[in-house]
Amino acid sequence: MRLDRRIITWAAAAAFAGSLPQAALAATEIEWWHAMGGKLGEKVNEIAEGFNASQSDYVLKPVYKGNYTETMTAAIAAFRAEQQPAIVQVFEVGTASMMSAKGAIKPVYQLMEEAGEPFDPADYLSSVTGYYTDAEGNMLSMPFNSSTPVLYYNKTAFQKAGLDPDSPPATWPEVEAAAKKLQAAGYPCGFTTGWQSWVQLENFSAWHNVPFATKANGFEGVDTELAFNSPLHVKHISTMASWQKDKVFDYGGRRSDSAPKFYNQECGMYMNSSAAYAGIKANAKDFEFGVGQLPYWPEAGKPQNSIIGGATLWVLNGHSDEEYKGVARFFSYLSSPEVQADWHQFTGYLPITHAAAKLTKEQGFYAKNPGTDVAIMQMTAHEPTANSKGLRLGNFVQIRDVINEELEAIWNGDKTAQEGLDEAVERGNALLRKFEKTAN
């Protein structure tokens, strides 16, 4: 009797399964680890939901794993334990490490070709894709959230200080002059900066078309050496250190910790990612703000182009062909003009494709939100050079920590700019040599 009940139960289950849509039964799960918290995380979930609703063969599952460093570390540990996700978001400074992880990654160009998905690298902004391509020009990862630093300024404060609210300072001497006028008008600090290594050294180098490191900033080989202790770099950091004394410049932390100084109108100018736009818009309650390009030193010549920050999506080996087909399908969805334009407009990250930028313009977004196109103009003003294509340096997460330590010693007056930058280069080179040994 017990056996009969089992037979009836199994038969009923089989009949029920047979009545379900086949696509629902066959849906393949794809895990995507990311580092987008807060509102950005909600938007990532929205993108995943949109993709899942667009088809019935795959279910994309986004998983927040902490900040960029934590997400990359978790992915490495998971791969070693053979429990890696199909997709992981890795910030730009992890590119060299990902490239050197032989056997761990499945290059995007190869993925798209094998899956038969339409894919043309020319559709993407060259200033973005150049960062993530190999020597033959093949895209290794899928651009997702790319940003570049810009200058935010308090237009209300500019007007109060007798400055033109529609003309942000273009050069560093103009920044100093504007800062002093802001202070005279009652604002304690002229300007502050987020991500000091990325903005004031890495992008400073590209913007002025001087090397941050040899070997085309690491693109031409791992036997590279750091070069950000040149006379121009020393002049810039030395000048910032002198400004720190009377708050023309005021340091506020290694990442975006200085944002409140701009939000609460303590500092009249703020340099940080184009992706900070949404946060500033939400927090600038009592003043109007504007966006300008990064300043430059006139004696170094006209600016070149800035370089990107943010992250890309890397595909990890060890998954089924069906999962990879789903990943490729998702990447096509993610790159569509509608999805990219919406992501760009919501976050302030760059539109990664020409079509998304065109659609955003046609929708009138730039006209309604002045300054949101500054990052694109800054990135695409000139064809990138060996000095402005980007950085591809091993152990760069640790090198940034070294740079931050040395810059803080300079701001505190414990070291001169020359001493601090020389020390940062020496310590950073030691980390590059360690990476070189593991990469060869």
Image (tube, grey):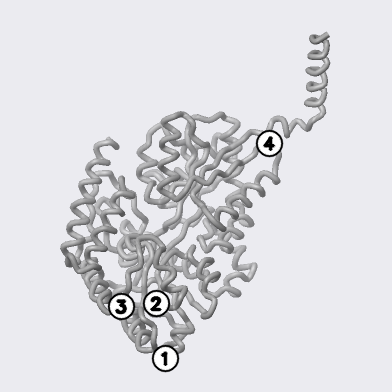
Measured Cα–Cα span from mark 2 to mark 3 = 9 Å
- Front-most of 317 and 88? 88
Residue in the picture at 60% in, 60% down: 341
From this view, report whether residue 97 is shown above or below residue 123. Answer: above
Residue 148 in percent (x, y) is at 43, 62
Which comes sooner in the sequence, label 4 or label 2? 4
Whether tag 3 and tag 1 are in contact, CB under 8 A, the answer is: no
From this view, report whether residue 95 is shown above or below residue 345. Answer: above
Which residue is identified by label 2? 267
Q: What is the number of the mark on residue 162?
A: 1
Measured Cα–Cα span from mark 1 to mark 4 = 61 Å
Measured Cα–Cα span from mark 4 to mark 2 = 51 Å
Comparing labels 4 and 3, the label whose residue is closer to the camera:
3
Residue 73 as seen in the image, left or right of residue 325: left
Q: Quadrant of the C terminus?
A: top left
Q: Amino acid at mark 3?
A: Lys
Which comes sooner in the sequence, label 2 or label 3? 3
- Front-most of 25 and 141? 25
Which comes sooner in the sequence, label 3 or label 1? 1
Residue 120 in percent (x, y) is at 54, 48
In the rendered image, the residue lying farthest to the front is 2
Residue in the picture at 79% in, 21% down: 14
Note whether residue 422 is visible.
Answer: yes
Q: Amino acid at mark 2?
A: Cys
Measured Cα–Cα span from mark 4 to mark 3 = 58 Å
Comparing labels 3 and 1, the label whose residue is closer to the camera:
3
Measured Cα–Cα span from mark 3 to mark 1 = 19 Å
Which comes sooner in the sequence, label 4 or label 3? 4
Measured Cα–Cα span from mark 2 to mark 1 = 16 Å
Which residue is identified by label 3? 247
